[in-house]
Amino acid sequence: MDFLKLVQLSSWFVFKHVPLTYSASTTTYEESNVYQELSELLDEIGYAFDKHELKICTLRAHKNKVIKAMLAKARELEFDMSTNIAKSVLSSIISQEEIDEQEAIEILTDYVTSDVSKQTTMRERLFAAAIRKSEDFHIVMLLNGEGARRVV
């Protein structure tokens, strides 16, 4: 087995050709072939990998890439990342659906360069959006009888 080929296929599949809203219905023929080839190579080394695991790894790799870009921008803007609030702001930004590097950096830049009042408003909006995606929020909605009306 060619390990270099496995790494190249993984990188190609994860970073270039898997949409953030990855599902079986959005998979192209080319992506499907690469997934199949990648799966076969992983099977050769005894590593099981299904589409759900691949989706999770893909999203995690994308989020890591965006977070690294935001951290670099935060340093450039001299934004103090030592506080839990600052870390929570970055976490809230990355928790947004289908956010790319550029959008995340724009939101962060807007937050950092804003006055305290606007920062507070943005922070509350970001935190509320992030918490609405949590399992705890979902449980509260269900137990409050609102689960059927929830739009995720």
Image (cartoon, rainbow, N blue to C red):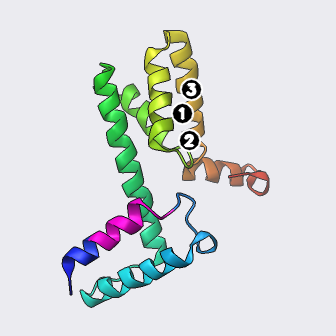
Amino acid type of disc 2? Ile
Residue 150 location (% of width, % of height): 74, 51
Label 1 to label 2: alpha-carbon separation: 6 Å
Amino acid type of disc 3? Glu
What segment is highlighted magenta in the picture?
8-18
Q: Tell whether 98 sits left or right of 94.
A: right
Per the image, label 2 sits on a secondary structure element best described as helix
The answer to if 16 sits in the magenta stretch is: yes
Q: Tell whether 76 sits left or right of 14.
A: left
Label 3 to label 2: alpha-carbon separation: 11 Å
Residue 68 location (% of width, % of height): 32, 41
Which residue does the image show at 48% across and 21% down from the upper left? Answer: 111
Residue 137 location (% of width, % of height): 61, 47
SS assignment for the magenta stretch, majority? helix
Which residue does the image show at 57% across and 60% down from the upper left? Answer: 21
Q: Tell whether 58 sits left or right of 122.
A: left
Which one is earlier in the sequence, the residue at label 3 or at label 2? Answer: 3
Residue that label 3 marks: 124
Per the image, label 1 sits on a secondary structure element best described as helix
Amino acid type of disc 1? Phe
Q: Which mark is residue 127?
A: 1
Residue that label 2 marks: 131
Which residue does the image show at 52% across and 25% down from the upper left? Answer: 123
Quadrant that contains the N terminus: bottom left
